Amino acid sequence: MARPEQTFAWWQKLLIKAKIWQPPHLTMHHVVRDMERPVPPPVTGAYGNEVVTATRPRLVPQRGDEKQG
């Protein structure tokens, strides 16, 4: 994304040239920060975003696993 272009009136350009006034510092960070946030996507999957560890097998078996199952 390109940097936002700031347009100034003739009297603002004169103030900048005379170093009396400095325009507010504006970068893409400031523009993106003030943009409207996107809508989060809908929850998908069998359990949504919840991770069910009781039914999910562990990658490294633990000592008490054979008793629970």
Image: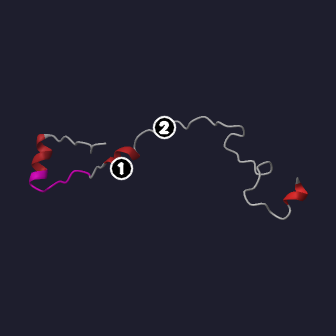
In magenta segment, residue 22:
yes
Locate residue 54, reporting x and y percent.
80, 51
Q: Nearer the viewer, residue 20 or 58?
A: 58
**Which of the 4 image quarters holds residue 59?**
bottom right
The image shows residue 15 at horizontal and vertical percentages of 12, 50
Check disc 1: other Cα within 10 Å, few if <14, some if 14-19, many if 20+: few
Judge from the rendering whether residue 40 lies leftward or rightward of residue 11; answer left or right. right
Which three-letter amino acid code belongs to the residue tagged 1? His
Position of 15 with respect to 54 (left or right) is: left
Q: Mark number for residue 15?
A: none
Image check: 58 left or right of 39?
right
Colouring method of the image: secondary structure
> What x and y, as percent, mark residue 21?
17, 54
Q: Residue at x 38, y 44 (%)?
A: 32
Q: Mark 1 touching mark 2, by CB under 8 A?
A: no
Mark closer to the chain start, 1 or 2: 1
Q: Position of residue 2 (x, y in %)?
A: 27, 43
Picture mark count: 2
Q: Is 1 in front, or is 6? A: 1
What is the distance, in whole Å, between disc 1 and disc 2 at their CAs?
A: 16 Å
**Main SS, magenta residues:** loop
**Start and end of the magenta stretch?**
16-24
* Residue ID at (11%, 41%): 10
Look at 17% across and 42% down and name the residue there: 8
Indicate the amino acid at tag 2: Pro
Q: Which residue is mark 2?
A: 38
Q: Judge the density around disc 2: few (<14), some (14-19), many (≥20) Cα neighbours within 10 Å.
A: few
Quarter of the N terminus within the rendering: top left
Badge 1 is on which residue?
A: 29
Q: Which is more toward the observer, 68 or 44?
A: 68
21 magenta-colored: yes
Mark 1 lies on a secondary structure that is helix
